[in-house]
Amino acid sequence: MQAIQSTFDDLGTPLAGVTFVVVDLETTGGTPAQCGITEIGAVKVRGGEVLGEFQTLVNPAEPIPAFISVLTGITDTMVRDAPRIDSALPAFLEFAAGSVLVAHNAGFDIGFLKAAAARTGARWPGFPVLDTLQLARQLVVRDESPNHRLSSLAQVFGSPTTPDHRALHDARATVDVLHGLIERVGNLGVHTLEELASYSSRVTPSQRRKRFLADPLPSAPGVYLFKDGSDRVLYVGTSRDIRTRVRSYFTASEQRSRMAEMVRLAQAVHPVVCQTSLEAQVRELRLIDEHKPRFNRRSKNGRKVMWVKLTQERFPRLSIVRQVKDDGAHYIGPFRSRLTAQSAIDAVHEVVPLRQCTGRLNGRGTACALADMGRCGAPCTGAQSEGDYAVVVAECRAIFTGNARPSAELLRARLEELASQERFEDAARVRDRFLQLVRGAARAQRLAPLLRSPEIVAARRSDLGGWELVSIRHGRLAGTVVSPRGADPMTYVRSMQATAEVVPAPTPERPSALTEETEVLLRWLEAPGVRIVELDGSWTCPVGGAGSVRSELEPAVASAHDVVGFDNDVPGPRSGPGSGGRSGHGGATGRAAGLRRAG
């Protein structure tokens, strides 16, 4: 089925109220760019009644090929005094204004009309289009008709008009085919233009019949929960328009196979209206974490993340852990999988000669191959003192908490060495591991200030002219409200703060929010147009931290093919409110200027 050009704001336009203009063309050939139109025929119908007809021959300003004249019966003599397309096309467009265009093999007819509009300088209105050929291929089986040509379908649906390659006659026959097809899909529960446009035989009748579940839902932003007969949550989603999005699950616009199974089991849809899209995103994450719906794949395991830990012992090493503890050790992450966490560890070992053995060291061990390769100082044998090893640990700690640039320079040297040896695959592998490392380190450095801040109040202009106001406490969405256009936003800020959720400072055993929620809030804060209204605490990131290295490395990875390395001309993170890569360690404190009444 050819996709409909969306011009209707409200889903559910009854077919009985739609004005269709069924059009057919005769041409001098099959290529719109090289051939011309010789005849236009159209029939305007609504609710099964004919409202008018349009027919005109067109002078194509070129000879009509003999075989075309034999096929259509239209000759050069017949079109000699006919209007040119620059006169005929505006008349047709006026006749068809405000309608849905219908054609059999619509790509051919609409293609010629659009090409004619382009040549003559006429504005093409962007009609919604339905193709009876594509629809018939899904509704008319071979037992009824050997093919889906217009002449065959006209017989199937008992059209009194026999198609004969004259535009108006063929358009009349197409009208009967259209009505026959609409009657068939009506028996399958398709009663609106949008359902007809998205009709597909892949959508079962039982799936379509459940579209009534969307009828009572609000056309508002928020979260929706599909539930089964036992009130178990099957799926959680979010949308700017809950009703429109839920209706799409009962049409061909929903292509995911597992969603068909979900709809089959669904018995109810519960809406949760939200004031802002940010609130909807957060509520979706929390509901998925709470219910673990079987048909959600994303965010179901938000608590199952990995961290890379620099241990607190005499000769520290790196390990992968599932939980951050208040033990004085340094952590980076979270990582979504053990594989990515291990890649980050491997990247550290590429540039920092930390020990990789896991046992306790007593200075009487046997050196491993890494010591022979110069990639470990062999503290296991006593060859490296605790003080000398502390220098190595400081380099690793800098990646975790402070200046990652020295390690980035070591990486650059390592990549250049591998590239000079034409070991490009090894260089790419090292570079990608280091990218996982700086991503994890940057994530930790960016999230930590947010988690430490008792409250951040931020604002962004809403689409309606007011302000979206947000209270974030220890990395958790504590409250949100929208101030209307023309109102004093600070009044709404005070009200929001008074009623916002009380969020205690997080501990390793009691995190304030899912890490994914804090990341969503951080992305929102860093988005263009967001202003900090009040900040209780400090929000900082180190100048040479992992975030700045990441901003250089990621563009290089995206563009690297043969040469592996950094791009010195790639700009670092933008400074200013919401950058996530702020200069210095002082951060922003107090109240920011710039929020005023929106009117």
Image (cartoon, rainbow, N blue to C red):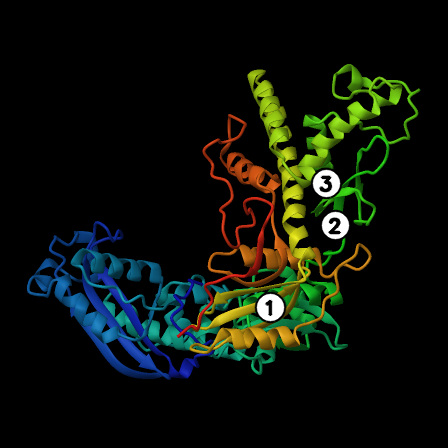
Name the residue tied to disc 3: 341
Point out the residue furthest to the left here.
81
Q: Nearer the viewer, residue 208 or 494?
A: 494
Label 1: state its secondary structure: helix
Snapshot quadrant of residue 470: bottom right
Label 3: state its secondary structure: helix
Q: Specify the amino acid type for callout 3.
A: Ala
Lower position in the chain sequence, tag 3 or tag 1: 1
Answer yes or no: is residue 408 visible.
yes
Residue drawn 83% across and 22% down?
385
Q: CA distance from mark 1 to mark 2?
A: 23 Å
Q: CA distance from mark 2 to mark 3?
A: 10 Å
Name the residue tied to disc 2: 305
Name the residue tied to disc 1: 279
Q: Nearer the viewer, residue 47 or 145?
A: 47
Q: Nearer the viewer, residue 254 or 21?
A: 254
Q: Where is residue 500? Give x, y as percent.
A: 66, 73
Q: Nearer the viewer, residue 551 or 459?
A: 459
Q: Specify the amino acid type for callout 1.
A: Glu
* Label 3 Cα neighbours within 10 Å, binned few <14 / some 14-19 / many ≥20: many
- Position of residue 512 relative to residue 549, above or below, is below
Q: Specify the amino acid type for callout 2.
A: Val
The quadrant the N terminus occupies is: bottom left
Whether the residues at callouts 2 and 3 have beta carbons within 8 Å, the answer is: no
Q: Where is residue 365? Give x, y as percent.
A: 91, 20
Q: How many marks?
A: 3
Label 2: state its secondary structure: loop
Tag on residue 475? none
Q: Where is residue 214? Give x, y as percent.
A: 58, 78
Lower position in the chain sequence, tag 2 or tag 3: 2
- Position of residue 350 relative to residue 139, above or below, is above
Residue drawn 63% across and 35% down?
404
